[in-house]
Structure formats: structure tokens, C-alpha cells
Amino acid sequence: MAADYPKHEHDVLVIGAGGAGLRAAIEASGEGASVGLVCKSMLGKAHTVMAEGGIAAALGNVDDRDNWKVHFSDTMRGGQYINNWRMAELHAKEAPERVRELESWGALFDRTKGGRILQRNFGGHRYPRLAHVGDRTGLEMIRTLQDHGIHQGIDVHMEFTVVCLLKDGDRVSGALAYDRERGRFRVFHANAVVLATGGIGRAYRITSNSWEYTGDGHALAYRAGAELIDMEFIQFHPTGMVWPPSVRGILVTEGVRGEGGVLLNKEGKRFMFDDIPDNYKSQTADSPEEGWRYTQGDRNARRPPELLTRDHVARCILREVREGRGSPHGGVFLDIAWISEKLANGAEHIQKKLPSMYHQFMQLAKIDITKEPMEVGPTTHYVMGGIRVNADSQMSNVPGLFACGECAAGINGANRLGGNSLSDLLVLGKRAGEYAAKFAKEHGGTSIDMSQVEEAEQAALKPFSETPIEGEESNNPYDIQFALQETMQSLVGIVRQGAEMEQALEKIAQLKKRAQRVAVTGHREFNPGWHTALDLANLFTVAEAVTRSALLREESRGAQFRKDFTSKDPEWGKANIATSQGPDGQMKVERIPIPEMPAELNAIIEEMG
């Protein structure tokens, strides 16, 4: 039977080719390892390109008061102090070096008048910190990493979906995948595996994530015995497009607000002034003019309220919509056109700073953002939760299994600051690749258990032997996926409560039963229905993990807001929630204590206020 499966041999297998996967592959190859890179879509089509605003790194090019200690403090405050403090420390310290390294590999950044990398303001960051290329920073990062990576001898396998991780005893030994074009299976044998598969946005109906983001890495690791943490924390980006319906959820970068965009309700009121947290009041601008000066780098000005943390802004927008003060299509207005009136060359300034947003709205919504406001609303954007990994090495509790980027967890705690995702994938992606290569070298070879391969293939092909069912109990994969997305959107969304989440768990269980009989027609080649059917298991895993974790955390903190527990509980500030698969195959969630922060890091947080 083994002869039926084409086999690829590598020291390190990287699954996912966004910024984190590419950076890990480059580093592993640089360590002398043979590297295979598998991606679900085409190389270059990764969610990293949607991170448009910039890379957070304390370079101090615009404001010399910035340094790694301030960045560390901002990250911990944004994460409500349940972050992995060691990851946040490494990230803040190493981000500037990773940005300069990216520049040395050919990345082109916007420049200050003195020729240094320009940095812009972003929500939750005390000083202008985001190195950027207009509003196309993620795209420039992917271009640079790909151009650099092709010279490293990395073996790239495009349009492959991994269906399971393979194990040799307790240790990971590779993966089984199928090519999406022909539907044929291949075995990838490796001594270490790095997961860099991105997020879980497709578990929700309204999302900025594209079709690939079905929680694959989270679920693959979970089924292989790895722990997940912080799965209750889903970041709903405050600004996604809401009109026309065909583009609902597509991201509108925070860079629009970072360049002076203001949020207005249908009455023309800047509603963000109505709800400023006490700990931010002293830092918040009193007037639009002062906010404008802040966004342009005036170190003496205070920040506009639109640049509060994403969870807070998203809830304020939801409040306006629910109380009848929203825009015609169920959002609010984001206005940067006012700059056209303030500056003689305002329209040119907007197009220069936000070229992607200008073209996005012009082409998709027939709106000229230099002349009229955009309609925006919250969209499922990012999951703070993911695979629990060691801060220094990025290895999970499964030997040889590493993770980085959005599918790994710890650095962000209860809420991620904008821009930290791109520096996170550079810093921790580099570390994941480095330590995976060392592990593969130091721990010798693994073997492939072909019985695992055959069992996984049979399970993957099962939908072809099922009979389609019509009606309410349809076993069509698209119907089941849509029902799950509706459940998560309505019952485990921005504002949550216990009774609704209990209802969500019941619905998820019912949908899982339906999915056991999921049926597809046709054959394995070019069959998107089959691909959707195989995504369902991963979506159910992450949806259940999010819901169970959110139900257990009986408080509101960061991106988790519970209507039935509206306050923070100091005791919950000392714990993360871990999710794992029990011996009976059932999901279990439990509190795990957060290790005490060293005195020197505590002192930094106190010093920064």
C-alpha cells in the first residue's frame, strides 16, 4: 500500500506560507535543514497581505522616547496582563532587528525626511511605532520574504491541504495531505513540523479572513495531542466593509484611523468621545485638531479616541448600531475625507498614504474616500488563542511540533494590538524555524506509520460514499458550514452571555452529528464541495474550543465581553484557559495559572504606568 502514496522527505516541514511560515522556512533552511513548505492556496495568497497598517517595532525613528520597554508595556496592557510575558519580552526586544533585517533583504518602507523608516500611530501604541509601506505593508513583507526565500533551496508544495499530522510514538513525524487540483494524497515525512496556518475566521459569517482560514493548524495540533490556550479571545476588527453585501467583512485597515480618520454615527457625531476608559482619558485628545496633530507625529499632542484598542472600538460601534444611530447598511461612518478640506493637497495626501483603501472603495463600492465617508462595521479578524508553545523555542507539548504566527498563542493575551501581528510573525517565526531545525538535527529520524495514513485517507474519502439528504437535515457541506457560521456569529460574537453559549454548544453538537453523514457528489478532481466537507472537522474543533473557553471565563476582559459578567475578575487575571482532547476523545477546558512575572519586568510596567 505504501507505494500508492508519493512521499516527500524533509528535515523540517512548514505548513502554511504566510509571513510566519516563510520566515520559519527561511530560518530553518539557513540552519542547514532540508525544508518543505506546504500551502493551502497559491504562494503569496496569505492573510499577511491583509495586515496593511504596518509592523510594530520600537525603532524610535519618529519619537525617540520609544523603546522596547514601552512596547513591552503596551503589549501587556493591551493583552490585559494575561499574555505570556516572556513572549512579549522577546517580541519587543527583537522586533527592531527583524525589521532592519527585512529592509536588508529588500523591503521598501516609507521614509522620514531624514531617510529613516517612517512610523505611524496605531491603536494601543503609545508612540508612532508602525513601520509601513503606505497601506500595503503586509504585501511588501510577503514579496520580500518570498524573493529572499526562493534562494534558500526550499521545496514548495502549493495548493495542498493537510488532513492529519502523523506521529511516531509521542513525536510528530510528518503529515498526510492531498492536492486540491487532482485530489491525490501525498505523505510528507519530517523530523520536525512547524504549523503556521493562520486563523479561524471562517467559523463566523462576517469575517475579513479568506476561504483558507478554517482553523486547520489549531485542529491538527489539537488532534495530535497539543494544548490550545486563550481560545475565548476573538478579535473583531472594528472596521470592515459593510456595503455592498458581496464585500461585507473585507478589512478596512486601522491605518485609516492612524492617518486621521474619524468615526461618526448617522447624526454626524464622533461617538467615540462618549466612552473613553478611565486609564486612557489623560492620553485622549480633546479636539479633532489635536487628534490630527497626533496622527501626524506631533509628540506633544494626544491620541484621538478612534485609536483606542480594537475590542473597545468594536463594542462602541456595535452600541451605535443597536441603539439606532448606525449607517443605512448596519454600520457607522469612517470619514477621512475631512482632510481634503483641511489641506490644500488633502486628496493627494490621502491617496498617497492609503492607496489600497482608495482603490478598494472605488472599485468595490464606487466610493471616493477623498470626498465621502466609508461605511464600516466590526468583522471577525484575528484569534488571540492558538497552540500553546514554549516562548523561546515555539515548540508545543508534542515533541517536534512547533507553531508560530496566528495559530500559536501567548503573546497577545486577551487582545492584540494592531501591528503586533507582523512583528510577531517575524520574531517568533524566525525562532520557530531556528529551533525546529535544531530539534530535527539533534533528535534523529522518525518513521511513518502507514496504518495512520490509510486510516486518514479512508476518513477523508468517506463523504463520497454517503447519500445526499435534502431539507432541514441536509448533509450538504455548504449548508452545515453556513449553519455553524450563523451559530457562532449570533451566539458567540462580540457580546456574549452564558445561556446563549450553552445554546451554541447544543447546536454545534447537532451539526457535528449531521456532518458525520456529510455527502459530496462527483469525483476527487476539482471538487470544492469535498474540500468544504474536509474543512468542517477543523471548524467544529475551533468553534467548540472558542465557545467552551468563553463559557468558562466568567468575566469581561479584552476581546471577551460577557453581558452576564461585565466586570474583570482579579482571579481570572491570574489564569489562562487551556483546551485539550481527553482520553475519551471529548474536549476539556481548564484553568492554568500564569507563571509569575520577574521583578524586573514588573518594574517596567509600573514605570510605564
Image: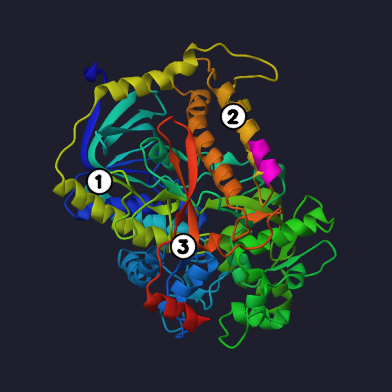
Secondary structure of the magenta portion, mostly? helix
**Is 118 covered by the magenta stretch?**
no
Against 46, residue 320 (above or below) is below
Disc 1 residue type (three-letter): Ile
Between the residue at mark 2 and the residue at mark 3, the CA separation in whole angstroms equals 31 Å
Against 71, residue 458 (above or below) is above
| Depth order, front residue of 582/49 | 582
- Left or right, 339 with respect to 399, comes to right
| Depth order, front residue of 101/556 | 556
Between the residue at mark 2 and the residue at mark 1, the CA separation in whole angstroms equals 41 Å
Give percent across and percent down for residue 592.
45, 53
- If the image is split into quadrants, where does the N terminus sit? top left
Disc 3 residue type (three-letter): Asn
Disc 2 residue type (three-letter): Ala
The residue most toward the front is 571
Q: Earlier in the sequence, mark 2 or mark 1?
A: 1
Residue that carries the numbered disc 3 in the rendered image: 83
Q: Earlier in the sequence, mark 3 or mark 1?
A: 3
Residue that carries the numbered disc 2 in the rendered image: 509
Q: Earlier in the sequence, mark 2 or mark 3?
A: 3
Q: Residue at x 59, y 79 (%)?
A: 296
Q: Which residues are magenta?
A: 498-504
Frontmost of labels 3 and 1 is: 3
Residue that carries the numbered disc 1 in the rendered image: 154
Label 3 residue SS:
loop
- Left or right, 423 with respect to 441, comes to right
| Depth order, front residue of 550/118 | 550
Give percent across and percent down for residue 365.
70, 50
Give percent across and percent down for residue 374.
71, 59
Q: Residue at x 46, y 72 (%)?
A: 110
